[in-house]
Amino acid sequence: MRQGSSLTPMFRQYHALKRNHPDAILLFRMGDFYEMFHEDAKLASRVLELTLTARGKGSDNVVPMCGFPHHQLDNYTARLVRASHRVAICDQVEDPKKAQGLVRREVVRMVTPGTVNDPNIVDAKENIWMASLAAVGERLGAAFLDASTGELLAWEAPGEGDPWGALAERIGSFVPAEIVYPEGFCWSESFRRERGRRAVLTEADPYAFASESAARLLGQHFGVASLDGFGLRNRAAAIAAAGGLLSHVRETQHCELQHVHELRLHEPANHVLMDAATGRNLELIRSLRDDGREGSLLRAIDATVTSAGGRLLRRWLLAPLLDPERIRRRQDVVAELLDRPDRRHTAREQLKRVHDIERLLARAVSGTANARDLLGLRTSLERVPELTRTLDDLRAPLARDILDGIDPCADVAQRLAEGLVDEPPATLRDGGVIRDGFSPELDELRSILRDGKSFIASLEAKEREARGIASLKVRYNKVFGYFIEVTKANLHRVPEHYVRKQTIASGERYVTAELKEYESKVLHAQERAQELELSLFNDLRSGVAAEARRIKTVSGATARLDLLAALAEIAAQNNYCRPRVDDSNVLRIVGGRHPVVEQTLVDERFVPNDTNLAIDGRAIALLTGPNMGGKSTYLRQVALIVLMAQCGSFVPADEAEIGVVDRVFCRVGASDSLADGQSTFMVEMSETANILHNASTRSLLLLDEIGRGTATFDGLSIAWAVVEHLHALPGGAPRTLFATHYHELTELAVELSHVLNLRLAVREHGDRVIFLHRVEEGAADRSYGIQVARLAGVPEAVVRRAREVLDNLERDEYGRDGLPRRARRSSPGERRIEQPPLFGLFEPQRPPASEASKEDERATEVLTDLRRQVPDRLTPIDALQLLSKWKDLLDTSD
């Protein structure tokens, strides 16, 4: 079977198709089954848990084989795609009854992680992006397509800077399931390695990615003579990527992609930029804990009731606006719906009955929609007129633009209502999909089939009476068709015109000329009815695809109305306020709350906090305070409030005034990249470097514990220098929240005019501490790490020893020579280990231990007295007297 002429005709056909799809698992239709052979069978049997058998057993050419019934295609295809495999579906494309010789087969569809539209695979509220890459000269381009919704975007790397870095940032923001690239594409190896771990890489025909052929294809598809109207003038790399991607998907899906009716230029400069690390650290879409939705901002504020509305919210969160006017237009709609709860609630109830129009349309375009899909589309379109009537008195300009632009596609809904039954079966093979009265020919055939049952009943009664055989029966099976069955005891009554067909244990089976004639009529009617019903359904489906542009517009309008109503609902439920967003550099939040954390608290109330940056020129806030005090929560809540505001949402605060930010950087938490040989500290420094290179005056920076991954003095030095660098940025310091345990940094608030100190308040009771989670102005002098260790369950002996070491370090932190000392044990008889010289032979002579101890006691006494003083209450003469007292005490010699 494997070599040349020894192959059977079927295997020659199989191998010819497999050669055209070497990287896909070929599902080869054979009768009522899909079969897989050779390596495909071995792989699929493991993934699908199918029994691996063989074809040609007992011969020298045994071929591994496995398969499944054809009606389980969607289920098994979904499992293969979830395992990141490409699937080529090969069907019989001619009627086996009419075929001359071997039935002709073709690959009718490719299913890949980037082109899947099966609802069993696709997350209803997430886009499934497929990306493409292209290069024209020195320029890099990319395109992004969600084949399940029809969204197509093109992007080109800016001329200056690192194009691969910019491309990595764009790919990271879309997180495509599949990346298509032309054969011979010159990759950056580090980029290819990183992307290959996160997406399926697919090589494609390079001709489609040539800028000229790509531009021609795009022009033909969108019916335009020039692509300038899409913003693609002089963007050859973006055109090449978009045209190549569209060509590849059309070829693999074997359809014209009518639902892809718009090409948009993806211009990140119009939106807030966030790198992948920032989005991950802020937990915008996924929780850091388990990479799930629970615990993310998206989950906390997603009150949408349609799948398309949920996907739109996700896109808004990942690309907030920079234009205050566009932000205010969204806010106006949210405000009006917030003030009209009756309208809001009614509209949301109506929207709950709207299915995923975008994805139902995509299935219709690809030819995979079944009758229930079209029914869902019909009922969704029928809901649109009542929705527009409910919201027709809204006056916000954006709401009017949406409502006035809605075409409910009543003709499409009417056609589907006339053609489809109200409760169609899941599959087409059993018929019963087309409504009576839609097709006169089908009605006639169905009448024949219905009358056939009464004819058989009357024939059976007539023959019983004529032959005197009460047990005579007229029956049917697929092998013999219709026949008359007579028991052995009545065989002598059988007339001569009965033609014996089969002998059975209980008697004989016969046919008559009359029965054969009617059988031919009924079976022809059955076969013709099935063919006609399938043809009528395909016409309905094609009619829907032909109206893709109109239907897609309806979907976009209902998604936006759903999202705006959902934002109003969330604002009402959680007491959000409308933020004032403008072009200033102010960031003022009164009573701000973390939108996720406050929803998780059950027995306690979230403590709100204020934020005031850049109001008096002080844009950099150094935040100190205890572990578990809430520093990271506070940092994240400020960023989330800003992003929500620039999406057009109301925010969790009493008041908010936000000057738009162009980029958000969040360096919070510890992570490593062992696969790339990067330690936790290396990743931290790489992210810090990215921030310092790209932050502008209008950026928002959230920095948590910069420098903590190395030696204390190294880390302190780096953190110090980072603050100074940000302070000196041309145009002014960016708005920055810098959380740290390096209390020495608080001195920068005295030295640098744009820096202020904030701290997390605590209350102490003996050895215990109460975290108040309240941010106030000023600097903290302790981190309370030992108290946190106790709360975490660290053994008491370790806690006691840690406190003793801390006391020694705080008392002996620096000697008079300026050198740090190790913590000593106070237990009698234990030998103290002296600190080795930090500067080798150049260490100054240290005083004897007894002298040092007395000096330390005097220094401790001075420090204790100093801490008790309140500088604002001291007169100048009081201060001079204290200074003289402390100097005398420190200068006292034995």
Image: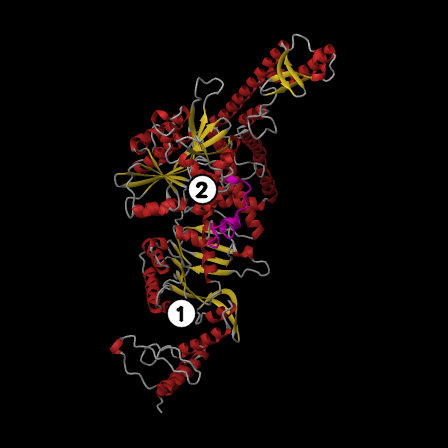
Q: Earlier in the sequence, mark 1 or mark 2?
A: 2
Side (left or right) of 839 relative to 708: left
Helix, strand or loop under label 2: loop
Select label 1 or label 2 by which is in front.
Answer: 2
The x and y percentages for residue 151 are 43, 36
**Majority secondary structure of the magenta segment?**
loop
Rendered location of residue 298, percent (x, y): 50, 48
Q: Which residues are magenta?
A: 286-308
The residue drawn where x is 33% and y is 67% is: 714
Q: Name the residue at the top extreme.
A: 496
Q: Which residue is mark 2?
A: 83
Secondary structure type for disc 1: helix
Q: Is residue 448 above or below residue 613?
A: above
The dot on residue 743 is 1
On whether residue 831 falls in the magenta region, the answer is: no
* Amino acid marked by disc 2: Ala
